[in-house]
Image: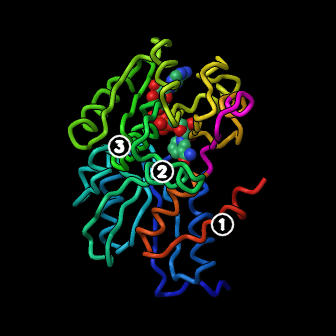
Amino acid sequence: MTERLDGHTLLISLIATPIRHSLSPTMHNEAFAKLGLDYAYLAFEVGNEELKDAVQGIRALGIRGSNVSMPNKQAIIPYLDELSPAAKLCGAVNTVVNKDGKGHLVGHITDGTGAMRSLKEEGVEVKDQIVTMTGAGGAGTAIAIQAALDGVKELRIFNIEDAAFENAKETVKKINENTDCVATLTSLKNQAAFKQSIAESAIYIDGTGVGMKPLEKESLINDPEMIHENLVVFDVVYIPKETKLLKFAKDNGAKKVINGLGMMLYQGAEAFKLFTGEDMPVDYIRELLFKD
Ligand code: NAD
């Protein structure tokens, strides 16, 4: 019989579909156990159709918080009582807090703070820097908004002309209206502008997922001249740990290359802090979940 779960145990949920593959339940439960916190974290297969009832369930059962993943990150917003500034700007939520179990649900987004913390832990300062980004989908938007909130001077987003391009127009508008960061959006077709932007940037963030299966043989940068010794290259992908982009950047003299493992870990750690008020033991969790 487990010693940990009893009548006082507080529940944290994860609502998404598909979700059984997620590392989050293991990450949070191991962290609760390590710190001796009386919480349990469970995943529930919930799509848009069940979402409204699921959120009522969180209120009715006094579930203390929930992570939210696709396809619910945007759809959950109308059912919440309040949004953090970043979640409001992103128009997306990945963490819901039900403070004291009283039913007032506040939506947060920790993907962006997780990415920024990952950069910081690697000694990379974003404040006052020029940053070039590709990708303006879910991950890209969260990173762009948080980078702007954290004081990036100029954020230059490049995207292919798909549905995310329209979304990126909105993101750029919101950043320019609500933060001191100057954001621009350019088609990735304009390779000369992309090259010029990276030459002027301290950080390049690839938020597209190019480099992950089925695009593991691809990279959006293939010209060695685009990599310079002052450039930090951050890829949101964490499987594989070294994408074609990161290998190319490392081989061609980038200042530093960073994969998406830290972002994954710290988005969880930021949610853990919001749920429990405690710091996740990140070194322990990294060793447990992400060692080679
Ligand atoms: P999304 O579908 O919402 O957005 C994808 C973005 O990439 C869009 O801007 C799209 O225009 C662009 N894109 C797609 N194919 C492209 C191509 N061939 N060339 C150039 N641009 C292209 O996806 P998402 O949810 O934002 O996820 C993107 C990646 O981020 C995925 O690989 C995902 O696994 C990863 N991710 C990592 C973390 C983490 O914690 N490290 C968190 C969330 C997402």
Colour option used: rainbow
Q: Nearer the viewer, residue 18 or 168?
A: 168
Q: Residues within 10 Å of mark 2 (few under 14, many from 20)?
A: many
On-image quarter of the N terminus: bottom right
Residue 136 among magenta residues: no
Q: Amino acid under label 3?
A: Ala
Q: Amino acid under label 1?
A: Asp
Q: Which mark is residue 283?
A: 1
Q: Is residue 187 depicted above or below 23 in this figure?
A: above
Q: Which residue is mark 3?
A: 148
Q: Residues within 10 Å of mark 3 (few under 14, many from 20)?
A: many
Spot occupied by residue 78 in the image (x, y as percentages of width and height): 23, 50
Which mark is in front, 3 or 1? 3
- Res 171 quadrant in image: top left
Magenta residue span:
249-261
Q: CA distance from mark 3 to mark 1?
A: 28 Å
Residue 18 seen in the figure: no
Secondary structure, mark 3, is: helix
Residue 137 seen in the figure: yes
Secondary structure, mark 1, is: helix
Q: Which residue is mark 2?
A: 116
Q: Is residue 80 depicted above or below 128 in this figure?
A: below
> Which of pointers 1 and 2 lies earlier in the amino acid sequence?
2
> Which of pointers 3 and 2 lies earlier in the amino acid sequence?
2
Residue 252 among magenta residues: yes
